[in-house]
Image (cartoon, grey):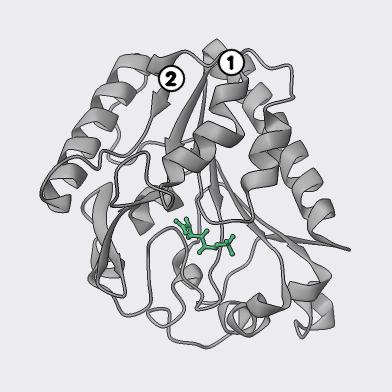
Amino acid sequence: MGTAGRIEILPDVAGVVTRSRALIVERLQTAIAERGIATIALSGGSTPQPLYEQLATENLPWEKIHLFWGDERYVPYDHPDSNYRMVKRAWIDRVGLPSENIHPMPTQFADPASAAIQHEADLRIFFTTYFADSPPTEWPALDVILLGMGDDAHTASLFPGTAALQVRDRWITVGEKSGQPRLTFTIPLINAARSVIFMLAGANKQAALQHVFALEADDFLYPSRFIQPQGELWWIMDQAAAQGLPETMA
Ligand code: 6PG
């Protein structure tokens, strides 16, 4: 099932960051206006770091904004590979986000599977607490889930051919990249979001993107194809990444 959504192609990575920032700020403000709080899950990797630095300069009601992570490398929070550490340095340390609004994936358990179970339990408590008036739901709708895409078409820590791609009855599961464990949102949790925003740049994404947007391709080989949210799906990319996509998609 080829992906759909709204595709915006910007001249360069700076344009991708600026556009992604605008989309995110709009959606956070709408969520706060409608429900009193906003929830956003963040991606790791290198592309979003300047975005987080720019979001830190926004004048937003930080006490109403809750940060989550769509995936996390299974390392301590002070490890150079930690997505939490990257966001803390680029964003959290620069604004007055209350600590209770920051929901990192736990990586202190000996067993990543126990960490996934614990994080899901914590998220269930969060959503039942903050949305007590809403009907109970199997899948909570985060306001924004920001995703990157690897040059192998993975997203979050949903890597090609891995067991995490089969998990449909959990919110959080254990992914793995080259044998290294990671924690990740599952496909159904991502697809329950109000807005999913893919943010990517660089010619190294071209081949993967062509498979992700192809009418026919194996979703298990190109996991970003599984991302078909209930809500909005945005693909914000630069010209370098978009090279080779059908003109109709531009
Ligand atoms: C991670 C990310 C991962 C990332 C892609 C793209 O933990 O690494 O969540 O899914 O988004 O690998 O990374 P770049 O943006 O650095 O290309």
Instruction: Tell me the residue at 57%/13% (across/down).
Output: 96
Q: Position of residue 212 (x, y in %)?
A: 57, 77
Residue 143 visible in the current orientation: no
Q: How many marks?
A: 2
Residue located at (49% from left, 69% from top):
224
Read off the residue under disc 2: 101
Q: Residue extending furthest right?
A: 11
- Tell me if I can see residue 230 in this picture: yes
- Toward which corner of the image does residue 5 lie, by quadrant? bottom right
Q: Quadrant of the C terminus?
A: bottom right
Residue 223: image location, x then y, percent:
44, 72
In the figure, 129 relative to 121: above or below? above
Report whether 148 appears left or right of 179. right
The residue closer to the viewer here, 58 or 132, is: 58
Q: Contact, CB < 8 Å: mark 1 with mark 2?
A: yes
Q: Is mark 2 within 8 Å of ligand 1?
A: no
Kind of element beneath mark 2: helix
- Closer to the chain start, of discs 1 and 2, is 1
Given the image, on which type of amino acid does mark 1 rest? Trp
Seen at 27% across and 66% down, the residue is 180
Relative to 115, is 44 on the left or the right? Answer: right
Q: CA distance from mark 1 to mark 2?
A: 9 Å
Relative to 100, say whether 6 is above or below: below
Q: Mark 1 = which residue?
A: 62
What secondary structure is found at the residue carrying circle 1?
helix
Label 2 crowding class (10 Å Cα cut-off): few <14, some 14-19, many 20+?
A: some
The one nearer the camera, 236 or 83, is 83
Crowd around label 1: few <14 · some 14–19 · many ≥20 (10 Å):
some
Q: Position of residue 176 (x, y in %)?
A: 28, 67
Please state if 125 lies on the left or on the right of 149 as rendered.
Answer: left
Amino acid type of disc 2? Answer: Asn
Residue at the image point whose x is 55% and y is 65% from the top: 149
